[in-house]
Image (spheres, rainbow, N blue to C red):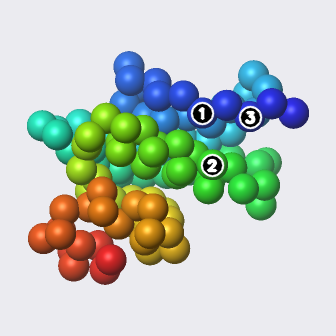
Amino acid sequence: MTTTVRDNSDEHRFEIHVDDALAGFADYQLHEGRITFTHTEVDDAYEGQGLGTQLADAALDSARDAGQQVLPECSFIADHIRRHPDRYLVLVPEGARGTYDL
């Protein structure tokens, strides 16, 4: 089983594929210097395999590499940042952290 994550910029989402099958995605909107994650979903057939974690890590790492600030309107991404503040909290603007309970 091969797992890959890619940014499908035409669809405004990061996608995780298992072999050739789409297993999940994280929708986003781009703004000047910011990326807002709006919804994350993993297909029920792939639940419990850590794919959501891989997807969130890749999306947030990509935002960091691009120098973007992150607005986690998606509860899954916000929860991921809460669980890994040492890696991702710095991506969320300080003034917005209360909005997302971070």
Any part of residue 54 in sight: yes
The reply to whether the C-beta atoms of the residues labelled 2 and 1 are less than 8 Å apart is yes
Coordinates of residue 22 in the picture (x, y in percent): 67, 31
Q: Quadrant of the C terminus?
A: bottom left
Residue appearing at x 19%, y 62% in the figure: 93
Any part of residue 75 in sight: no
Coordinates of residue 97 in the picture (x, y in percent): 23, 73
The reply to whether the C-beta atoms of the residues labelled 3 and 2 are less than 8 Å apart is yes
Q: Residues within 10 Å of mark 1 (few under 14, many from 20)?
A: many
Q: Amino acid at mark 1?
A: Val
Q: Amino acid at mark 2?
A: Gln
Is residue 36 toward the left or the right of residue 41 in the image? left
Residue denoted by label 3: 3
Q: Amino acid at mark 3?
A: Thr
Residue appearing at x 35%, y 45% in the figure: 64
Is residue 78 toward the left or the right of residue 93 in the image? right
Q: Is residue 13 above or below residue 95?
A: above
Q: CA distance from mark 3 to mark 1?
A: 7 Å
The reply to whether the C-beta atoms of the residues labelled 3 and 1 are less than 8 Å apart is yes
Q: Is residue 56 above or below residue 80?
A: above
Q: Residues within 10 Å of mark 2 (few under 14, many from 20)?
A: some
Coordinates of residue 25 in the picture (x, y in percent): 54, 41
Occupied quadrant, residue 91: bottom left
Residue denoted by label 1: 5
Residue denoted by label 2: 54
